[in-house]
Image (cartoon, grey):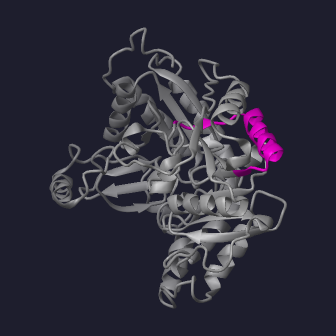
């Protein structure tokens, strides 16, 4: 597949952002005011983008401004916006059947999507699949299945983790305090262990995860909870919301060893890192570590709301009625998912490796003289640029937006670049140039001695 040309309209696409008005433009301002009058105050919009349409890697706002999208709806638009094969699948299925409730009946697309996900599961054992509406529901279901199978109550997650915002998944989440504040009591018997924060580009710090494994063994499993009470360890092989930190191979292997020793299930949360984004179906495959369960969503269906948790055949010991969902596995979403998986396998996964290497190198080059940048890291098209302070990251995020580049903050002070997997060399080079211009244009204070490090 030619990843540079994904629709008949490709020739008409812009090659540069077009900013026609001061941001936000007049139509955007009016819509933002209306939104703020009726929307939940819990929403945290990064900057005043009011999207009207999108195609490939380009997003057009309501005032006609055109942006190069290196956020992809938080790593969701994996095949680019409005990929013709995905759009065709959605239209065809919507004209045939929109909903039937797979909890109660059978439907071909539901079955076909399950079969496809089971075939790419990151373990040798035969897999089974439960489809969900979202990533947080996938985590909830995986935790339920782990507890039911093991008959154990405790779950171990990691500092900096993000697993969702529904109450059970929120209990595992610890990336930002504001996400948890005011919602207790949360799920009992959830323990958070340290996660290795490896900064390899400029700082060269963080180790290989050995120290964090020692804390897990001695402090968590040695003092706080008996291993025989732990149902599962839930880990992101690349922390997403937590700052785009890839876990060292030794750390993931150590978790597998601990789980094997104590009969604990290993759950890999690949909601952001899966579906070819790192150059393989699953980030866990880079280190050859097999989990017992894996959760997925985001890039699984090019923007349609669907997720899944997938587990080894031997783990599915719950009976009929133990879990279900009215909308999950909706036929239209499943059809979009099938088209998405075909595209990822048909060149986009390999493209993520090639373009990811190019993007990381280009960002290192533009950041080489930027003292505010602490680290550039990532795998495939999951690249983070960390700053010394949140204020610096926020200033560059806004400056990039003003130049027509969409990026998003994550962690304490990191900007993530997670473009659609259809991105080509020209777009990567453009994004790096715009990011470099944003670095130069951003106005932020230099960090004091107390702010450097951490």
Q: Quadrant of residue 206?
A: top right
Name the residue: 51% across, 89% down.
97
Q: Pick whichever, 211 or 1, lies toward us.
A: 211
Q: Pick whichever, 215 or 362, lies toward us.
A: 215
Residue 11 percent across, percent down from the top left: 48, 61
Image: 89 above or below 271: below
Q: Which residues are magenta?
A: 243-266
Q: Quadrant of residue 292?
A: bottom right
Image: 340 above or below 177: below
Question: Is 47 part of what is drawn in magenta?
Answer: no
Residue 150 percent across, percent down from the top left: 72, 58
Image: 308 above or below 240: below
Question: Is 248 part of what is drawn in magenta?
Answer: yes
Residue 345 percent across, percent down from the top left: 70, 62
Residue 69 percent across, percent down from the top left: 44, 49
Q: Which image quarter is the N terminus in?
A: bottom right
Q: Residue furthest top?
A: 449
- In the displayed structure image, the side of residue 448 where residue 104 appears, left or right: right
- In the displayed structure image, the side of residue 226 where residue 85 appears, left or right: left
Report the label total: 0
Q: Quadrant of residue 86?
A: bottom right
Q: Is residue 2 visible?
A: no
Name the residue: 59% across, 64% down.
141
Q: Pick whichever, 325 or 359, lies toward us.
A: 325
- In the displayed structure image, the side of residue 26 where residue 259 appears, left or right: right
């Amino acid at each position: 597949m030619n990843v540079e040309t994904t629709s008949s309209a490709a020739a008409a696409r812009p090659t540069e952002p077009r900013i026609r008005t001061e941001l936000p433009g007049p139509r955007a301002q009016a819509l933002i005011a209306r939104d703020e009058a009726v929307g939940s105050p819990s929403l945290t919009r990064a900057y005043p983008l009011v999207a009207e349409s999108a195609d490939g890697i380009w997003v057009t706002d309501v005032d006609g401004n055109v942006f190069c999208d290196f956020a992809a709806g938080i790593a969701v638009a994996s095949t680019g916006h409005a990929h013709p094969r995905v759009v065709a699948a959605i239209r065809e299925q919507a004209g045939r059947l929109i909903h039937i409730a797979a909890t109660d009946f059978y439907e071909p697309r539901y079955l076909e999507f399950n079969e496809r996900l089971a075939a790419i599961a990151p373990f040798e054992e035969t897999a089974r699949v439960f489809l969900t509406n979202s990533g947080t529901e996938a985590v909830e279901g995986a935790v339920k299945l782990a507890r039911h199978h093991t008959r154990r109550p405790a779950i171990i997650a990691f500092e900096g983790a993000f697993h969702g915002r529904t109450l059970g998944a929120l209990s595992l989440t610890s990336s930002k305090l504001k996400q948890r504040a005011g919602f207790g009591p949360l799920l009992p018997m959830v323990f958070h262990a340290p996660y290795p924060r490896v900064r390899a580009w400029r700082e060269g710090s963080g180790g290989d995860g050995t120290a964090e494994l020692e804390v897990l063994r001695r402090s968590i499993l040695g003092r706080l909870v008996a291993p025989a009470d732990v149902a599962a360890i839930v880990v992101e092989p690349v922390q997403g919301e937590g700052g785009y930190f890839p876990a060292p191979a030794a750390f993931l292997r150590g978790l597998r060893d601990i789980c094997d020793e104590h009969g604990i299930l290993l759950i890999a949360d690949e909601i952001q890192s899966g579906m070819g984004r790192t150059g393989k179906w699953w980030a866990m495959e880079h280190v050859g570590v097999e989990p017992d369960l894996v959760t997925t969503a985001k890039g699984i269906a090019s923007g349609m709301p669907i997720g899944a948790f997938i587990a080894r055949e031997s783990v599915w010991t719950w009976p009929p009625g133990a879990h279900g969902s009215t909308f999950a596995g909706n036929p239209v979403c499943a059809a979009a998912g099938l088209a998405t998986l075909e595209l990822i396998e048909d060149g986009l996964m390999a493209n993520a490796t090639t373009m990811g290497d190019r993007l990381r190198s280009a960002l290192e080059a533009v950041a080489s003289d930027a003292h505010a940048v602490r680290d550039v890291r990532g795998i495939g098209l999951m690249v983070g640029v960390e700053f010394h302070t949140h204020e610096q990251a926020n200033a560059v995020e806004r400056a990039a937006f003003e130049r027509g580049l969409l990026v998003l903050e994550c962690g304490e002070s990191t900007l993530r670049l997670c473009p659609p997997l259809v991105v080509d060399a020209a777009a990567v080079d453009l994004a790096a140039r715009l990011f470099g211009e944003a670095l130069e244009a951003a106005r932020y204070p230099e960090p004091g001695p107390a702010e450097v490090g951490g």
